[in-house]
């Protein structure tokens, strides 16, 4: 629990669950470079080595992500990957 709180408080991750071997799922705000683009076009996966699992839009429910998902300003991304990679992505927001 202490590690989870530390990642949320000290970084830009909105929420964080670490599993093992430094692998985690986290919530983060959308980086500006992805706004107005599909996930496939944004290349977040190849640039940051993370997988966007889903998106939560303000006032809407959770949506599973696909390469065709259009990212909008204000979206919250649910991402999975190694903790340092997640933090690197979150620091862009």
Image (cartoon, rainbow, N blue to C red):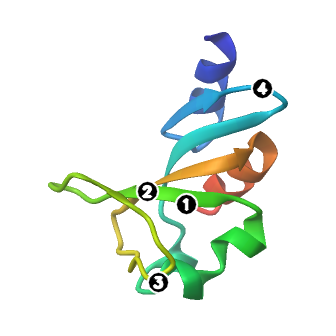
- Give the class, few, some or many, for how many residues have Cα within 10 Å of label 1's Cα (few <14, many ≥20): many
Residue 19 vs residue 72, the one in the foreground? 19
In this rendering, the label closer to the viewer, 3 or 4: 4
Mark nearer the N terminus (3 vs 4): 4
First of labels 2, 4 by sequence position: 4
- Say which residue label 3 marks: 38
Calculate the distance from the C-alpha at mark 2 to the C-alpha at mark 4. Answer: 21 Å
- Point out residue 71 in the picture as x, y percentages from the top left corner: 40, 75
Question: Does 81 sit above or below residue 37?
Answer: above
Which element carries disc 4, helix, strand or loop?
loop
Residue 52, which numbered label? Answer: 1
Residue contact between numbered discs 2 and 4, judged by CB atoms under 8 Å: no
Is tag 3's residue or tag 1's residue first in the polypeptide sequence?
Answer: 3
Residue position marked by numbered label 4 in the rendering: 20
Q: Quadrant of the N terminus?
A: top right
The residue that label 2 is drawn on is 54
Q: Are marks 3 and 1 in contact (CB under 8 Å)?
A: no
All told, the count of numbered labels is: 4
Q: Position of residue 18 (x, y in %)?
A: 67, 28
């Amino acid at each position: 629990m202490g590690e989870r709180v530390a990642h949320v408080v000290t970084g830009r991750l909105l929420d964080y669950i670490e599993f093992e071997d430094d692998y985690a799922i986290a919530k983060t705000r959308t980086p500006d470079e992805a706004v107005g683009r599909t996930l496939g076009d944004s290349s977040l996966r190849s640039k940051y080595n993370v997988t966007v699992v889903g998106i939560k839009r303000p006032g809407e429910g959770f949506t599973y992500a696909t390469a065709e998902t259009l990212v909008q300003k204000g979206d919250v991304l649910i991402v999975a990957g190694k903790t340092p990679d997640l933090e690197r992505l979150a620091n862009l927001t």
